[in-house]
Amino acid sequence: MKKHYSISELFDMNLEILKGTARTIQNRANRENWPYVEVACQGGKNGKRREYTPPPPIMAQIKEREMAKVLADTAPKLPALTTTAIAKIEEINTTEAQRTREGARLAVLKTIEQLMAESGVSKEAAITTLLTQAKMPNFEHVAKMFELALDERGASGGLPSSRTIKRWFAQRESHTLTPKVAQADMDMPVWLPLFLQCYRLPTKPSVLMAYESFVAALAKEMPLVKVPSIHAVRRAMSKVGKVALQDGRKGKRELKNDLPFKRREFLHLPPAAIYTADGHTIDAEVLNPMSGLPFRPEITTVVDVATRRCMGWSVGLAESRFTVLEALCHASRAAIGSVWYVDWGKGFENLMMTDEATGVLGRLGMTMKHARAYNSQAKGASERSHNIFTRAAKKLPTYVGKDMDQEARKALYHWTRREIKLQGKIVASPIPTWDEFKAFIEAEIEAYNNKPHRSLLKFTDDNGKNRHMTPNEMWALKVAEFGEPPKVLPEDEGWLFRPQKTCTVRRGEVQLFNNVYFSSALEEFNGERLRVGYDVQDAQWVWIYDDVGRLICKAEWRGNSQSYMPDSVIAQAMDKRNDAALKRVEIKRDNVLAERRQQIIEHQSSVNLGGLVLDMEQLKAQGQKVLAKQPEAETLEAVYKFVPNPEPAWEAPDSNATKAQYAEYKRLSSMSRDSLSEPQQKWLDWYANSGRMELMEEFMRAYG
């Protein structure tokens, strides 16, 4: 241990017995005549400085300090808190107002010490001088410093007293300079659990409704407890966490949206590493290709997680295994994915997709992974891809989403259904056909792949604009980094994409979906179970494969069917049967004629009436002459033969038939007013001033 110390060394020790600034210690050494020695140094007076020998009490404290330092150096090292950890602890334990006041108080103390060192005055004089400066016009910063240092109670005149500032010095030495704030009482009242039972219900009652039920329950279960006011209940609720308050009002799945979660990183993945797919019913009506009636089709999309690129899609009448298969086939033509990450829907979890021997995934070499049930948050890439079609549906005139104007939606609905009812099909309403809709969806997906995606990397493009990458740009970047992923070649599409099923060969036949297919090449495979590939659109042929996927043959529907007997035999038998039937008809005719009654008088040439012979031909000619002299009978046709058809009276269209009214208005407007009847002129004037004409013209401009 040293025996001589410089003034700066003594000041840095910050001894309890030796307080003050370096100037204060120098004055004390001069006043008490401490012994000293002069040592060489850089700078100083004449290149020397003084090192003093403090009095014994000060030397004893220095010795104690040095011994503690030695013990600390030899003791085992404990992990120390980092600056970040210390700052975090302080930030947790103190408020922003507390930290602001602590900093302002330290600034006040430092200013006072600086004033003492520069002017050589005592602490009391420095405090008085600083308080005086705070009241002067040119020292607003000093007044502001004192204002920040005071707590909420403040002081008279906005300045602390001299005694308060001295207390700050003492608090700084004991590390308690941070002002204390009143802590809220976090004790829970005994009745709060009972109230939460009435509040945390799936029906989500309001606080007032829950309070009414709580008062009745409190009188029954806790009769000795005083009934709190609703304001006390609200204050108690503020002590409960936000998520805890919703537990019971929300189910576990809905409550998950309020809980912390983990984000999945995907930028490090290679292209086509993970494919995710999902179905979405579009919010617009399209003509059904089968029935020609309006319906909402189902769109299945396949998205590459690493690049957010839409790799494949399909449109179907509903989500099924065939629409999922079509979307996967579409995506695999661009690149075969490694992982197929989907939910547990019937379109994804079926033998056509997952069977080890005949499934499409097994032939492509893809691994299926399922998201947890009711955990759509984990499939954000596919869920957010629905926004493509939500925005696209608004571009169609048949949009039926929740934000569609109800009046316009209802008008279009009645328009289409009236056409179907009257004409049996859609004629003039603006509903896209199936082919038009598919072309529209293809254009929308292409636009999505070329649009900046906010979850992808940012870069500066050729135009100097800092923007996110598009899915196509991200795909090109990934391909350049990891290489081109494998894809399905055109010659392999039939083998890979045709659904397969294992069937048993029996005498050259296989039975699939109640259809029988035959090939002579299956003769030696009798009794074996082979893989049968089929085309979902054409049932005429199936393809037979062995266990390793080699094509055996192509079997035809009813390929071994032939006529039960030779055609000539059947023709002879049919002719013989027809001849027998004709003979039976002739015999029956003869029998009918034989049973016919004798001719009546009208059909005889003459009649003998008691010796009087009457010539029937002569009597018939005389009767015709008499009939010719009679006037023409007044039949209905004769009465109205020369009377013109009267023109029907004009009637105004039904008030509910808006389209018929508009058509009649257009017809009457094109005619001259003189040719119109009085009712037509009055109706035309009424319709032109009713506002319905402008509404229909606006509707026709909007929807054609």
Image (cartoon, rainbow, N blue to C red):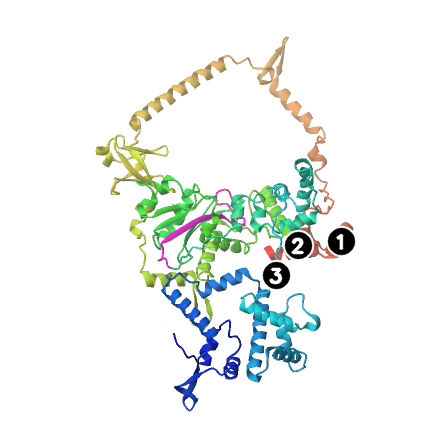
- On screen, residue 90 versus residue 629, left or right, reads left
Q: Nearer the viewer, residue 272 or 37?
A: 37
- What amino acid type should be assigned to the residue bearing mark 3? Val
Tell me if residue 85 is in the magenta stretch: no
Q: Nearer the viewer, residue 293 or 11?
A: 11
Q: Quadrant of residue 196?
A: top right
- On screen, residue 535 versus residue 163, left or right, reads left
- What amino acid type should be assigned to the residue bearing mark 1? Trp
- For disc 2, the marked residue is 696
Q: Tag 2: Cα neighbours inside 10 Å, few (<14), some, or many (≥20)?
A: some
Q: Residue furthest top?
A: 610
- For disc 1, the marked residue is 686
Marks 1 and 2, the one that precedes in the sequence? 1
Whole-percent x and y of residue 250?
56, 45
Quarter holding the N terminus is bottom left
- On screen, residue 2 versus residue 429, left or right, reads left
Q: Residue furthest left?
A: 524
Q: Is 663 drawn above or below residue 150 in the view shown?
A: above
- Total tally of numbered discs in the picture: 3
- For disc 3, the marked residue is 181
Marks 3 and 1, the one that precedes in the sequence? 3
What are the residue bounds of the magenta stretch? 268-292
